[in-house]
Amino acid sequence: MTANLALPSSRVSEVNGQLQAVKQEITKVIVGQETLLDRMLIALLANGHLLVEGVPGLAKTTAIKTLAEALGLTFRRVSFTPDLLPADIIGTLVFNPRDGAFTPRLGPVFTHLLLADEINRAPAKVQSALLEAMQERQVTIGDATHPLPSPFLVMATQNPIEQEGTYPLPEAQMDRFMMKCLLDYPTKDEERRILQRFTEGTPAPVRKVLTAEQILQARDLLPLVYCDEKVSEYMLDIVACTRKPAAYGLERLAPQIAYGASPRASLTLSLASRAHAILHGRPYVTPQDVKAIAPDVLRHRVLLTYEAEAEERTSDHIIRDILDHLPVP
């Protein structure tokens, strides 16, 4: 596989060094959670959004807040609750009695990094308030449309334990997230380091090592990352197999899949794979990049049947079966 001559390896090495410097600053505060840190950087680089599912106390909020500090970007947090209103997120028009006019009061969505904490605690109309912001990077209040800062990233969290009083995200909302990342407990060694870091001293301060302009310049590299036609076909086969598994020799999966991934999944998989390649210092995409990122891109886009749920199958099981079955180019 030959790298695109339009993207010199030196430029990739430069951006990779910047991203590694950001990770190094974040690890001054965060212990472990390597997957979460990588997925945050990939989403930022590929202009996407991230849905994170994990039990409380796994440093989800601290991770994105620390990322904002390392990048010198603005950060806002919104705790989604059943009584939240769309205006509490995007803003509203406020009447000014002095001049008899309505003026916009912008909500917390006008920031670079937005943490939508426990997003499934709020009803659908509140969740849908983020749709325009996440897709078009703008918000309409009254008759006026207001652009959001750039870069703009939404990181939403979900708690997999308590399901009472929650409102599952609609499929259209789920599809707006580039990736869904599942977090697990830290290892015993990592937890020991957490105890030492936060009970026996003060973590080192986080330095700003990257700017918003540098992030936007790094984004311009994604179209230049070389992706062989065979690798592109591999991505398309993976997504198509979630829709018609029987056509790929996986008849046993057909009764388990209610709906496959949308065309947005193919685009997202390509962008995320390119960002994954840059994060690992390569100007070209390998099948391993695709296999590494595919579960996070597809797990929230593959909807299962009742039969699959009765057999305690998850979308991760389906995706793993597909990746194991399809030949790697």
Image: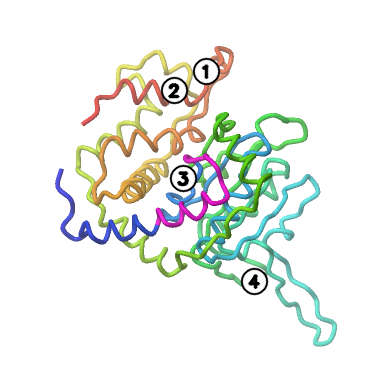
First in residue order: circle 1 vs circle 3: 3
Residue 82 at what x, y percent from top left?
78, 45
Q: Residue furthest right?
A: 97
First in residue order: circle 4 vs circle 1: 4
Query: How far is the residue under mark 3 from the one under mark 4?
Result: 36 Å
Q: Nearer the viewer, mark 4 or mark 1?
A: 1
Specify the label residue 318 is tagged with.
2
Image quadrant occupied by the C terminus: top left
In the image, residue 205 sits, relative to residue 263, either above or below, namely below
Q: Nearer the viewer, mark 3 or mark 2?
A: 3
Q: Nearer the viewer, mark 3 or mark 4?
A: 3
Q: Tell whether position 20 is magenta.
A: yes
Specify the label residue 8 is tagged with.
none
Specify the label residue 39 is tagged with.
3
First in residue order: circle 3 vs circle 4: 3
Label 4 environment density (alpha carbons within 10 Å; few <14, some 14–19, many ≥20):
few
Which residue type does callout 3 highlight?
Arg
Query: How far is the residue under mark 4 from the one under mark 2?
Result: 45 Å
Which residue type does callout 1 highlight?
Arg
**Residue on which disc 1 sits:** 313
Residue 62 at what x, y percent from top left?
62, 50
Q: Nearer the viewer, residue 175 or 120?
A: 120
Residue range of the region highlighted in magenta in the rendering: 19-35
